[in-house]
Image (cartoon, rainbow, N blue to C red):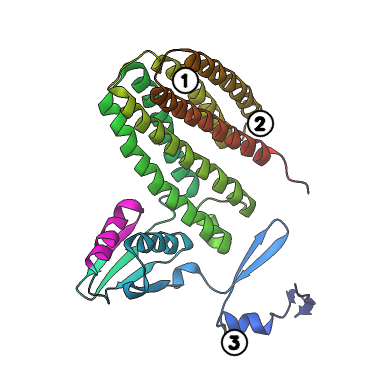
Amino acid sequence: MQTRKIYMSGGSTYIMSLPKKWVQRVGLREGDSVVVTEREGALTIEAREREEESREVTIKISQVESGEVLERLLISYYLIGYDTIKILLDDSQHLKYREVARRIPDLLVGVEIVEDTDEALTLEILLNERKMPTLKAMRRIDLIVSSMLAELIRVLEGEDEALARDIIEREKEVDRLYFLVVRQLKGAVRYHQLAEKLGIANPRDALGYRMVVKSYERIADHCENIVQLYLRLLAEGGDELADCAALAKLASQAYRKASKAFFALDMHLAHEVFSHLKEIRELQEDILNRLFQSNIKASRAMLLKGMMDSLNRIASYSSDIAEIAINMSVEVPG
């Protein structure tokens, strides 16, 4: 941390010097403009508008161990804020890497392939922050997850295999929006003018949003896990799914209250979620006791236990969302 003195200039303007090393590092010269943003009694100085920058990175597949590593790299560069990702196909075994790169637009919002030749493949990230602000994207995720939970109850009550497989597909859309929101939040922390476009009024909110969107993503994962276990059980039939459906209803209620409390910053509604959590754990314990005292096959019992564990995790992530809603609803000291 450095200290700077303030001087009066011309009788009406206050001025201060900028650290020389910072000016040189960001490439500023005499006569250049900087962006000054006021937030809660603090001034943030940024070198330039983000729109003036083009962030590009090049990946040589000869330096990438596998297609899986390439996919993780592409997602990482997307999340950190790059606008152009060029993949040099400088290896004879490039087909598997090309296939991975071509799948990326299905995984990440706003990604387009703008070059696809024998030598290189280029991905361009085309996003308009004003058309998809962070809270709007999070509300879309919430709607999908709420729908997945409602459909999950119907699946467990009516044994609908087609609907179960649809839940698996919808989880992929949650992942796409999750990556988008994480990219937005990372950018909002670095660039205050971007935060304004994304509708993030206060940088401190970004941490809360990051934790909530991760909870959404994990809840969707557990919905998919429950469906995968259900499909393995489906061929055998049985009455135990009714217990899972009852547990799913309680988990869904907890989720809906938690998410509503988050968007409304309703502390009282958020507190109600914790009573649901206790009820869910008591019901799960009762179901498991009855399950393991029955003559059910051990393999089937373990699959059912896995489903109930995931439902319990959904309730736990819902309580995390409720806790964040409470924290964000508390007034910040002056």
Residue 212 appears in the rendering: yes
Query: Given the image, on which type of amino acid does mark 1 rest?
Result: Lys
Residues marked 3 and 1 touching at CB (< 8 Å):
no
Query: Given the image, on which type of amino acid does mark 2 rest?
Result: Met
- In this rendering, the label closer to the viewer, 3 or 2: 2
Around disc 1, counting alpha carbons within 10 Å, would you say few (fewer than 14), some (14 to 19), or many (20 or more)?
Answer: some
- For marks 3 and 2, the one nearer the N-term is 3
- The CA distance from mark 3 to mark 1 is 64 Å
- The CA distance from mark 3 to mark 2 is 51 Å
Query: Given the image, on which type of amino acid does mark 3 rest?
Result: Glu
- For marks 1 and 2, the one nearer the N-term is 1
Which residue is located at x 54 percent, y 26 percent?
Answer: 254
Q: Badge 2 is on which residue? A: 267
Q: What element carries label 1?
A: helix
The correct choice, above or below, for 267 with respect to 193 in the image is above
- In this rendering, the label closer to the viewer, 1 or 2: 1
The label shown at residue 30 is 3
Q: Badge 1 is on which residue? A: 249
Q: What are the residue bounds of the magenta stretch?
A: 95-113
Q: In the image as oriented, which residue stretches furthest toward the bottom?
A: 30
